[in-house]
Image (spheres, helix red, strand yellow):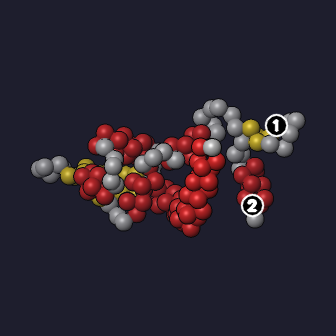
Amino acid sequence: MVKLLFDNLWSEGVGTQNKNSERRVFVNDDECPVRNVVAQIGDKWSILILFALVDGPDRFNSLKSRIEGISQRMLTQTLRDLERDGFVLRTVFAQVPVKVEYELTDLGKGLSETIWELVSWADNHHSKIRSARQRYDEKSDK
């Protein structure tokens, strides 16, 4: 199954094959989906914001209160980045005071479903990862 996954990645153009080796080469340009898309959503806050919006449209302050530790500036910037990439829709309602809501687009919903597999894997393996880190740190301290 893993080989099939990576075979599909090759055929979809993720990385290019080095002529002298079977190893992938990731080009440093905007055409590389790993650098262009995955790096963006792999930041500290994007996945949390996407998952907060899975529950439905929400307002800025509500998101800020639900995502502990995020600053106003970082929430603003990350929402702008997610909107720019087409994952989040920002709707301004013409009323007094102005009401702004954020919601997932179809692209954002699809991404959230895909990322859920990674999050589920992380949840299922969290204790093993923490144990591995602890063993590493103990070994490094000696």
The answer to whether residue 50 is seen in the rendering is yes
Q: Are marks 2 and 1 in contact (CB under 8 Å)?
A: no
Outermost residue on the front side: it is: 142
Quadrant where the N terminus sits is bottom right
Q: Nearer the viewer, residue 136 or 78?
A: 136
Residue nearer the viewer, 69 or 58: 69
Q: Is residue 4 depicted above or below 71 in this figure?
A: below
Quarter containing the C terminus: top right
> Which mark, by number, is residue 52?
none
Snapshot quadrant of residue 56: bottom left
Could you tell me the amino acid type at mark 1? Asn
Image-based side of 133 in relation to 58, left or right = right
Residue drawn at the location 55% of the way across and 62% of the way down: 126
* Residue shown at the point (63%, 37%) measured from the top left: 31
Residue at position x 58%, y 59% in the image: 131
Residue 72 appears left or right of 86? left
SS class, disc 1: loop
Q: Residues within 10 Å of mark 1 (few under 14, many from 20)?
A: few
Residue that appears at 11% across and 50% down: 96
Disc 2 marks a residue whose amino acid type is Val
121 sits to left or right of 54: right
Residue wearing tag 2: 2
Residue sitting at the far top = 28
| Whole-percent x, y for residue 132 in the image | 62, 56
Q: Residue 18 got which mark? A: 1
Label 2: how many residues lie within 10 Å, few (<14), some (14-19) or many (20+)?
Answer: few
Q: Secondary structure at mark 2?
A: helix
Question: Which is nearer the eye, 13 or 34?
Answer: 34
- The CA span between labels 2 and 1 is 20 Å
- Residue nearest the viewer, comparing 91 with 66: 66
2 or 1: tag closer to the N-terminus = 2
